[in-house]
Image: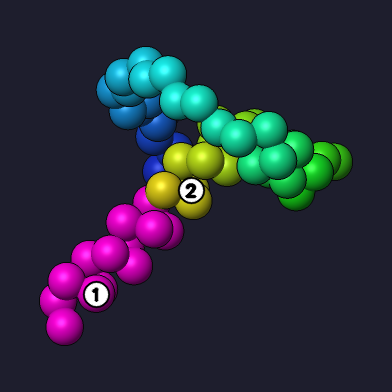
Amino acid sequence: MGSFRIPSTPSTTNKTVRFPNDVVEAVEQAIQGKDCTFSAFVIAAVRAALEDVDQLNQK
């Protein structure tokens, strides 16, 4: 038998964020035709930015 595990969904918090229209349009264009939601893109971008900030703080 395989080692399949049912994934757990991380807890989330709803936040309202206002984006400039040009940013929304750029994100929507970047994810067009891809298996990615606006939220998933923004979460990945914020995580990447947080890693950059952490690296800068470690210097």
Residue 26 lies, with reference to residue 57, above or below; the image says above
Check disc 1 and report the residue beneath it: 56
Identity of the amino acid at label 2? Ala
Q: Position of residue 8 (x, y in %)?
A: 35, 27
Q: Is residue 30 left or right of residue 19?
A: right
Residue at screen point 42% across, 18% down: 16
Residue at screen point 31% across, 19% down: 13
Q: Nearer the viewer, residue 26 or 1?
A: 26
Determine if residue 51 is in view.
yes
Q: Nearer the viewer, residue 52 or 7?
A: 52
Q: Are marks 2 and 1 in contact (CB under 8 Å)?
A: no
Q: Secondary structure at mark 2?
A: helix
Residue at screen point 37% across, 20% down: 15
**Which quadrant of the figure contains the C terminus?**
bottom left
Q: Spot the residue most to the bottom.
A: 59
Instruction: Determine which of the numbered discs, if any, sits on residue 44 in the image.
Output: 2
Residue 56 lies, with reference to residue 20, above or below; the image says below
Q: Which residues are magenta?
A: 47-59
Identity of the amino acid at label 1? Leu
Q: Position of residue 9 (x, y in %)?
A: 37, 25
Residue 3 lies, with reference to residue 8, above or below; the image says below
Q: Secondary structure at mark 1?
A: helix
Q: Position of residue 37 (x, y in %)?
A: 64, 32
